Every structure is written in structure tokens, then in C-alpha cells.
Image: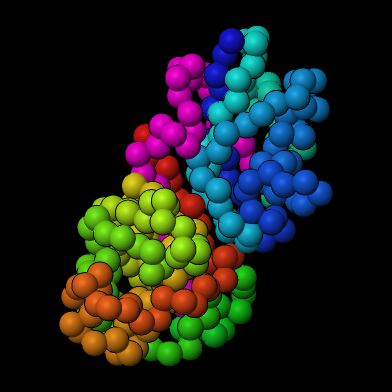
Amino acid sequence: MKNYLLRVQYIGRNFYGFQKQKEILTVQGIIEDSLWKVLRRPIVTYGSARTDRGVNALNQYINFYFPDEINTSNIQSKLNSILLKSDIFIKEIREVDLNFHARKSARGKIYAYIFSDNPEYALFLKPNVYFYRVPIEKQLVELALSGLKGRHNFSSFSNRDRSQHDRNDICELFEAGFIEKDFVTILYFYADRFLYHMVRRMVYYVLKAGQGKISRGILEDPFRASEIPYTRQVLPGEPLFLVEVIY
């Protein structure tokens, strides 16, 4: 038995997320169908991240098991001839250790969210750039991002049912920052794991902080507050990118 790893990038706007679902167009479903066409056997894949509807990936990792040795460059070429029409591109295929699992072996993930306050620039990059028309203060953004870092209960940034007492909402946010490039700003987050909608809710919170809508006391230590403001809004998925998975 062999274990093969795909490194994949895709544009998420036409997909209902990564995870395979019946009668719905998903990234995993398209890739498994394409693997069947090329390898002539049903293939079960395991993805590193279950990106939501509309979310893009620069580096998504997917592994699958196959009984025979394959010509990876040949298979990669054949897969791309099928997948490029669906906005999916296989960047690399290689054999990995049998114990490797794309999701379970991951130590962390990096996501980035792109926004702009320039309407002319944002117009031509829609929907992958979120237009935010209100100017923001960099110092407040830095303060908000700094307050989020560390190991915390991030349930306020997730829309899962709070009555579920057995769930794990503890995440460690290693890094959070922003990069200004031309007319866009890129917010990035590196954590050991992310909850459902967590990144998009954090981005909205940070943008509101940049407007001066949140007190400095909360920004400095939001997880001690009885309620963290501006965490219920989920921003669009198209400006969100899975940048990298750390192993």
C-alpha cells in the first residue's frame, strides 16, 4: 500500500466548500471524481482543512492510499487536464509515509483575508477582495490582533451551538498581523486549529476595532470580557485564503 500527498490550490467561488457532499459541487468531490477517471479505482481522500463555501486555497493538502506505485508526474499532468476547467490545480504529487494524514498530522494552519478601502481597486478584484469603505487606524488594528494571540477559548468567534458541552473551543493563535501592499491590506492568522467561521468573525472584529468601535480595555484582553463585541458577523468567504498548512 502507498500513501500519496497532493498539494492543491483552488478558487473557491464556485464550490460549496471543500468537504464532499451528495449532489453538491465541492472541491473534494471533484478531485475524487478526477482521481477515479485517471486511476480507474474509487479513491477516498483526506483533506488538511475543510474550507467553507467560497473560500480559496493556495496550499491545501490531500492524501489518499493506493495499492500500487504510480508515476506521480504523469498522474499530475492528467489530473490537471481535467481539474483546471474547475479552477483547481494540482501543484505537486508525492509519496509520503503511510502514517501521514493530511489533517491529523497538521500542526497548524495559516489563513489570510484581503480587504481594501479603495473602491476602484476593489472593483476589479471582486469577489476576492472585501471592500471596507471606512478608514481604519493601524495602531488599533495592531492592538486588536495582539489581544487575540495566545491560547484561548474562541467560542465567541464561532457560531456553533453553545449548548454542546463536549466540544473543544480552545485554540492557540501563534501569530496575527497585517501587511499593506499597494491598495489592499492582508490580515493573516496562524493557529494550531480554527473553529467554524472563526477567521471571518475575527476579521470583522478587527475592522471594527480599527474604526475605534471597541474600548482599549477589551482590545488588550478580549477574553476576559463578559461579552466580546462584533463577533457575530460572518464576512464573505471569497476574500479568505488558506495560505499554508504547517506539518
| Residue positioned 33% across, 67% down in the render | 178
Residue depicted at x 44% and y 34%? 104
Q: Position of residue 165 (x, y in %)?
A: 41, 56
Q: Is residue 161 left or right of residue 214?
A: right
* Residue 142 showing in the rendered view: no
Of residue 113 and residue 51, the one placed in the foreground of this image is 51
Q: Quadrant of the N terminus?
A: top right
On the rendered image, what quadrant is the C terminus found in?
Answer: top left
Specify the principal SS of the magenta part.
strand
Q: Which residue is pictured at 38% across the width and 69% down the height?
A: 156
Span shown in magenta: 88-116
Taking 11 as reference, is 195 left or right? left
Answer whether residue 95 is magenta in the image.
Answer: yes
Q: What is the quadrant of residue 121 in the picture?
A: bottom right
Q: Considering depth in this image, is 62 or 80 the residue closer to the camera?
A: 62
- The total of numbered circles placed on residues is 0
> Where in the figure is residue 196, as x and y percent of width and height?
49, 59
Q: Position of residue 102 (x, y in %)?
A: 49, 33
Name above or below for residue 199 compared with residue 83: below
Q: Is residue 241 left or right of residue 29?
A: left
Q: Say whether residue 97 is visible.
A: yes
Displayed quadrant of residue 182: bottom left
